[in-house]
Amino acid sequence: MTPKRYLFSTLLLLAGALGAPLAAHAAGDVAAGATIFKRCAACHSAEPGVNKVGPSLFGVVGRPAGAISGYSYSPAVQQAAAKGLVWSEEGIVAYLANPHKYLGDFVGDPAVPNKMPFSLADEQQRRDVVAYLKSLAPQ
């Protein structure tokens, strides 16, 4: 084996070994997310069409912001919807870290009113919640 090929093979193996734990961390755990979601359930339903203080989160992954008919969204979500926000997995992970900052940054107004009082500091917990929400997707 030539030195260049050996170096390339070594780097490739090292990249794979280092990347595996990162990929595992990036994935969420549905069962853990269901447990964490119990805190969210004070304001949000996981059932289709059942809104509480917050909108139903059934099928939220991939849904445009502000899309539930009949729910009174905050000005922040209304403005984000007008700008085309769609709730992607990564977007929800970022939103849950700091909802006010996320929507304020998205709409370009850090003072825009938002109803969401809750956040999750732990990234893995946010990913777990997203995995749970994704599992609720309409089949």
Image: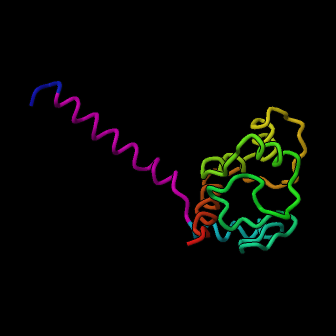
Report which quarter residue 52 is drawn in. Answer: bottom right
Image spot of residue 103 (x, y percent): 78, 42
Q: Quadrant of the N terminus?
A: top left
Q: Is the image coloured rainbow, by chain, by secondary structure, or in one colour?
A: rainbow
Image spot of residue 106 (x, y percent): 75, 37
* Residue at x 60% of width, y 54% of height: 124
Image spot of residue 77 (x, y percent): 81, 48
Q: In which quarter of the image is the C terminus?
A: bottom right
Image spot of residue 98 (x, y percent): 76, 45
Name above or below for residue 43 compared with residue 10: below
Report which quarter residue 4 is drawn in. Answer: top left
Q: Is residue 81 left or right of residue 112?
A: left
* Residue at x 85% of width, y 62% of height: 71
Name above or below for residue 135 compared with residue 127: below
Would you say the magenta stretch is mainly helix, strand or loop? Answer: helix
Q: Is 62 in the magenta? A: no
Q: Is 12 in the magenta? A: yes
> How many numbered marks appear?
0
Name above or below for residue 47 compared with residue 96: below
Report which quarter residue 118 is drawn in. Answer: bottom right
* Residue at x 79% of width, y 73% of height: 50
- The magenta region covers 5-29
* Residue at x 34% of width, y 45% of height: 17
